[in-house]
Amino acid sequence: MAHRVSARYFGLKLGEALQAAAAAAQSSATASLSEALQRGMAAYRARLTMPMLIGGAAMAPTLNPKGASQPDAVEHLLVRLLPRPSERSVFAGDVVAFTSPLTLAVAAGPAGVAGLPLGGGGAAAAAAADQEELAERLRHSAMVRRVAAMPGDELVTGEEEDSESFVVPEGHCWVLADNEAMQPPHVIDSRSFGPLPLVNIVGRILYAARSESDHGPVENSEEGMAADAPVVEAELDIGALCGGGGGGGGPGEE
């Protein structure tokens, strides 16, 4: 399948490469310039997206609309990876994949999630480990919800009689399920676990496909969709997405 590759896409990849190189240089006092450059080049060569599956009805009708009537239904998603999520890359209105705060945590190593191959091997191996960590989170601990509020936004919770207001703290966001018919405890979101740390976010959902003939982009924030447009043009392959190509993740956690 032919892809349109724009200068903006290469600019995004260059930006990821520079951030990866800078992170490598800052992570170790002994990191050499050549190691940082290798880390950056590895990041530049990597794809900006990964596929995953989502099940359940929590995000219906936006995602997996058949989930309410067909418990086994799943939908294929294309996720733009966000290795360093922040207020500069995540916006209110975005549909994001993230590691749930309620997920039982494994002991984390100094460079990431325990159990991942984050050991030696140089900068290229470290960059591959970064990618593998994100893939691992998509496979085993990813939940998908929509960002409803960002740091500094004021929210009101509870019923009118006992409603309380609070401000989303720095470094966090508030995420909700799209399915308004599902309420806690039948659905898990920030009403269950509170503000979500931005660092828990793995990526933004770009595209959803139920089949090779039934698919379309996911409605995110205007900022997110504008930033992601060149990524969709360059990396979306419906056949590969529906066929599970590209090393996709398992069904997202409900």
Image (cartoon, rainbow, N blue to C red):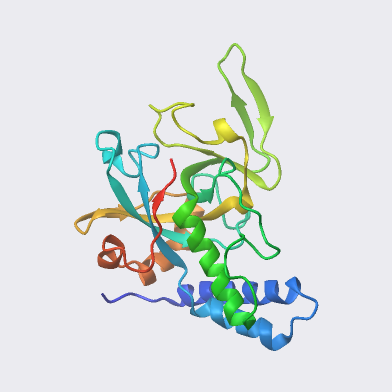
If the image is split into quadrants, where does the N terminus sit? bottom left
> Residue 252: horizontal and vertical position, in percent?
42, 48
> Residue 248: horizontal and vertical position, in percent?
38, 62
Please report the residue visible at 68 percent of the width from the left and 40 percent of the height from the top. 152
Q: Does 174 sit left or right of 231 as displayed?
A: right
Q: Is residue 19 above or below residue 164?
A: below
Which residue in the rendered view is the most extreme toward the left? 213
Q: Quadrant of residue 110?
A: bottom right
| 206 and 133: which is toward the camera | 133
Please report the residue visible at 66 percent of the width from the left and 43 percent of the height from the top. 151
| 199 and 133: which is toward the camera | 133
Q: Is residue 131 above or below residue 99?
A: below
Q: Does 93 sit left or right of 150 as displayed?
A: left
Q: Does 234 sit left or right of 94 as displayed?
A: left
Q: Is residue 220 above or below residue 109?
A: above
Which residue in the rendered view is the most extreme toward the right? 29
Please report the residue visible at 80 percent of the width from the left and 77 percent of the height from the top. 29
Which residue in the rendered view is the most extreme toward the top? 161
If the image is split into quadrants, where does the C terminus sit? top left
| Residue 81 visible in the displayed image | no
Q: Does 78 sit left or right of 133 as displayed?
A: left
Q: Quadrant of residue 70?
A: top left
> How many numbered marks appear?
0
> Residue 218: horizontal and vertical position, in percent?
37, 51
> Residue 174: horizontal and vertical position, in percent?
58, 39
| Residue 225 visible in the displayed image | yes
| 115 and 184: which is toward the camera | 115
Q: Quadrant of residue 64?
A: top left
